[in-house]
Amino acid sequence: MADNIPEVPLSLVSNQYLDKKVAQIRLKPILWEGYERANLLTHAQVELIKSIDKKSSQEIQVAVQGREDTYASLILYLLQSLSRTDTVQYVCVLADDILSGNEENARGFHTIANENKSYPYGPFFRILQLNDELACLEATKILTILASSSPCPEQNDLTELYSWLASQLTNANNNLVDIAVQELESLLRVRTYRVPFWKTPNAVNNLVALLDKSATPQMQYQVIFCLWLLTFEPSIAAEINEKYDIIPTLVDIAKGAIKEKVIRVAIATLRNLVEKAPSQNLAAMLVVKLLPFTENLSARKWSDADILEDVDYLKERLQENFQSLTTFEQYASEVETGKLEWSPPHKSEIFWKENAYKLEEHNFQLLRSLARILSTSTNCLILSVAASDIGHYIKFASRQGKRLLQEIGAKQRIMELMTHEDQDVRYQALSSVQKLMHQAWEF
């Protein structure tokens, strides 16, 4: 999986729940002549719509061929002019039939953009304001097809679509989550759409949250595929792990995955993170032991040669970085990622004597991170190591650093941990408090 993003049909949404709802809508009769009598439609428009009404997919394609912009104009006019929910649903299904039956038909919708400043997206955005599940699902499917086939994607403002999709990622109905993720797989293939989606409130947070333990292998694959597409953008690759801690998640999923395609897309995403933003991601990968894992992976037999290429690339870059990484950089990566364990620096008096002052650099950034881990972690190993680190730091801390620990509640938190249920956490907390008292701090 290198930089070449595979081509897939624009309308890749495949979901039985949606198909069943659409089948029910197809059966509903729409009294087009009634709209004509009410002067909402002309006779010519009614004849045009009846030429594809209740017709098979093949008959619709025959009717539309050569008249793509005429039918596109009709569909958009109907959606702007008619408001009955069942009619809007039905027109959306017809639009879906026209577009899904032949990708070339999307050109008709783009061609008529000059007829109305809101065309071709506006009428479908309007549907997203309706409180109707099927109409919204069909509208977002069509918006995805149109946006993916747009001749000028940089001119499209898809804010409403991104917001709707982001909200569906937390829906209790797994079918709606599945449809939203499938649509994102199409949209994020278009480079122009990646950063705006990244900036959509809660969008990436909700997407990453789908990778929890209950995710099916297929959902894992689809979500990671979206992350893979996002990480082609250097600005996103530089921030995504710091914001969403995806490196440990991807490594855990790859280690536990049964399906090869899940491992492939997870490794490809990790490769993107190294290629596009090495300085922000390599250290975090070393902390979660990705190097020995890549060594293990490179010895396996794979049906897809791309996996081995990506694994070998990661392994080489990690080996290079491992050689150049100082002990303190390794320690800082542990603290920044929150993945503390009893690696050598935590137990070395020499390490702390030489490096304690570095926790105070950049406005005490690392010390604040260590205090945050103490306050938020529920992992006994991590709490033990963090409490021990604070004790080591205290011995060499500046007066300002000691005062800061008091101000941000770290001293109080360590005293609380003296009564923790875990024996080692209690021991490390007690040891740190003894050092604290020995120092006879003045606040």
Image (spheres, grey):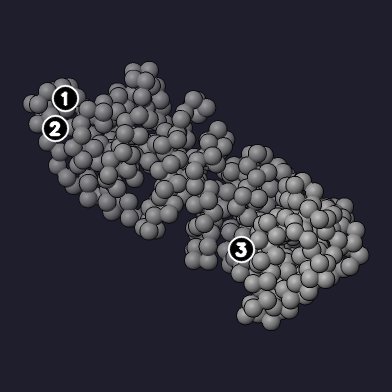
- The quadrant holding residue 331 is bottom right
Q: Please provide percent x and percent y for residue 29.
A: 14, 42
Q: Judging from the image, what secondary structure is the residue with disc 3 in?
A: helix
Asked if 384 appears above or below 152 in the picture, the reply is below
Q: Please provide percent x and percent y for residue 330.
A: 80, 58
- Is residue 255 visible in this depiction of the protein? no
How packed mark 1 is, by other alpha carbons closer than 10 Å (few <14, some 14-19, many 20 or more), is some
- Residue at 26 percent of width and 31 percent of height: 79
What kind of residue is marked 3?
Answer: Thr
Mark number, residue 20:
none
Mark 1 or mark 3: which is in front?
Answer: 3
Q: Judging from the image, what secondary structure is the residue with disc 1 in?
A: loop
- Residue at 77 percent of width and 46 percent of height: 362
- The quadrant holding residue 99 is top left
1 or 3: tag closer to the N-terminus? 1
What kind of residue is marked 1?
Answer: Leu
Mark 3 or mark 2: which is in front?
Answer: 3
Q: Is residue 221 left or right of residue 280?
A: left
3 or 2: tag closer to the N-terminus? 2
Q: Judging from the image, what secondary structure is the residue with disc 2 in?
A: helix
Query: Which residue position is annotated with label 2?
Result: 32
Query: Which residue position is annotated with label 1?
Result: 41
